Amino acid sequence: MKIKNPVLPGFNADPSMIRVGDTYYIANSTFEWFPGVRLHESKDLVHWKLLPSPLSTTKLLDMKGNPSSGGIWAPDLSYADGKFWLIYTDVKVTEGAFKDMTNYLTTATDIHGPWSDPIEVNGVGFDASLFHDDDGRKYLVQQTWDHREYHHPFNGITLTEFDTKTMHLKPETARTIYDGTNVKLVEGPHLYKINGEYYLFAAQGGTVWTHEEVVSRSKTLDAHSFETEPDSPFITNFDTPDFPLQKQGHGSLVETPNGEWYYASLVGRPLHHATESTHDPRGWCPLGRETSIQKVEWDDQGWPRIVGGHGGQVEVEAPKDAIKTDAPLNHSRHDEFDKPELDYEWNTLRVPFDDQMGHFGNGQLRLIGRRSLASTFDVSLLAQRWQAFNFDAATKVCFNPFNYQQMAGLVNFYNEKHWSWIYITWDEKKGRVIEVAQNDNNNYTSFLKDDAIKIPKGTDYVWFRTKIRELNYTYEYSFDGENWKEVPVVLDAAILSDDYVLQHYGGFFTGAFVGLAAVDYSGYKQSAVFDFFDYQELD
């Protein structure tokens, strides 16, 4: 078998990969999307099955009011003492000098849960991970944030002993074990003990085109004792601009039962407009930061090296002891809303799906219109990741607005400042109409205006479809589900990418989603009924 990168397509950033017995697990960042932390499992590193998210209650994760690209940053999954340990960060401030955050710990004996009530660990810095030493001691390893404007904000990697009796840190043991290199922005640390030495894997360069991973090692855990791997970095695509995989860096290491080594890394796959250089700008990644897996070998000096060079490979040899895993490589799916629980692919913003947002069952999803899609509070949006460059997504909706402040339809969404949709609304002259609109860095445009499409009298349901074709995408509608008409508006998917959002402000860590939404900012809570959601990949 071959590992074909990315193994987790679509927004699946900051992978924390472990092995327990013959099974591998990956935990990924989810930022402001609920539920928190995305989990997959595999026995072959090729096919990955989506598991229930561990942070599925507000007791474990309360993100109400969080800024976009705040929330869950770089969770760390580990296994020791017969249970899974999950360290996760909830970031409350993303812009400016401060990164207010809290690091939490939860545990479970079964990866499916239940997960224990969270223990507040500290707020020293994000990207915290838990290292279980072979002498039974445990340590928190983390990026360290420095708000002082006359210091670099990324102030090295701090290690602090964790007391398993009190389940709290020992702050007096804190020390900086690694400062990084002149590339700066050292973060995402994961510590391993291999052949009697400590190896620290850490990201540098920021999670953009300059991203990289460096490895350092030490015989002790003393302050400033780690030396950096010669011929660094361990992995980067900064100097491989024409390679289809970019941004590789932040990730984690795993050993197979037969002693092979693999490294899971975040990765971006840029697309380019026909008028642009492929080097500058290097491109746009509407699928966000995904997960790749590279094979690792050890040189005669005991340093890890990426097989094929530090740029990595698109196709990688799977482990020799791989056990075929039953999970599809194509993520096409269809939801009739007839199950007692929502499919694991569905996500909401900041808070769980509840009765204030709507309800589902008996083949229907009812969304209650609330605030606009430009809000960070009380949004009725149910969405799934873009996981392919080419796909169609469709739905069927019944909505009876009585004013123009009421809207419901099919949305492509990055964050509250960057999205578009096709929707039903009310026009004073025409009655119920179909409109297409876009919010581009909070510049809102209605494309049809006075030419909004009138919905014929007696029409209960309208079908909507979006066609994503790499950097171009369109919307279509139908009044019978068979005869489709395209709205003559071609939109740019680059607007739904980290790379585009980064041009305007610092929240740029997620990826494009497609989903269903209902808005009633008049406050009358007019609801919309959706009969199904269909997502079909064409890649």
Image (cartoon, rainbow, N blue to C red):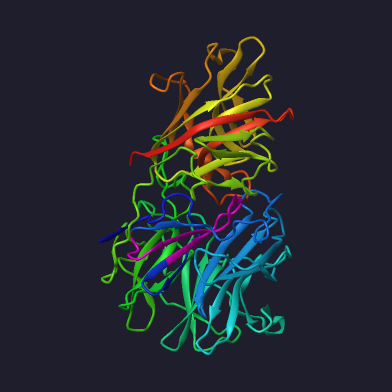
Q: Nearer the viewer, residue 178 or 485?
A: 485
Q: Quadrant of residue 116?
A: bottom right
Task: Work out whether 58 lies above or below 141.
Answer: above
Residue 63 makes an appearance in the image: yes
Residue 163 in the image: x percent, y percent?
Answer: 65, 83
Quarter of the image with the N terminus is bottom left
Residue 75 in the image: x percent, y percent?
Answer: 56, 64
Q: Is residue 338 left or right of residue 128?
A: left
Q: Is residue 132 left or right of residue 358?
A: left
Task: Tell me which residue sits at (56%, 52%) in the image.
Answer: 509
Q: Nearer the viewer, residue 381 or 412?
A: 381
Task: Work out whether 416 lies above or below 44.
Answer: above
Residue 467 in the image: x percent, y percent?
Answer: 42, 31
The number of numbered badges drawn on the structure is 0
Residue 232 makes an appearance in the image: no
Quarter of the image with the C terminus is top left
Q: Is residue 268 left or right of residue 224?
A: left
Q: Is residue 186 left or right of residue 469?
A: right
Task: Tell me which residue sits at (41%, 49%) in the image.
Answer: 269
Residue segment shown in magenta: 25-46
Is 412 magenta? The answer is no
Task: Tell me which residue sits at (48%, 40%) in the image.
Answer: 338
Residue 185 in the image: x percent, y percent?
Answer: 58, 65
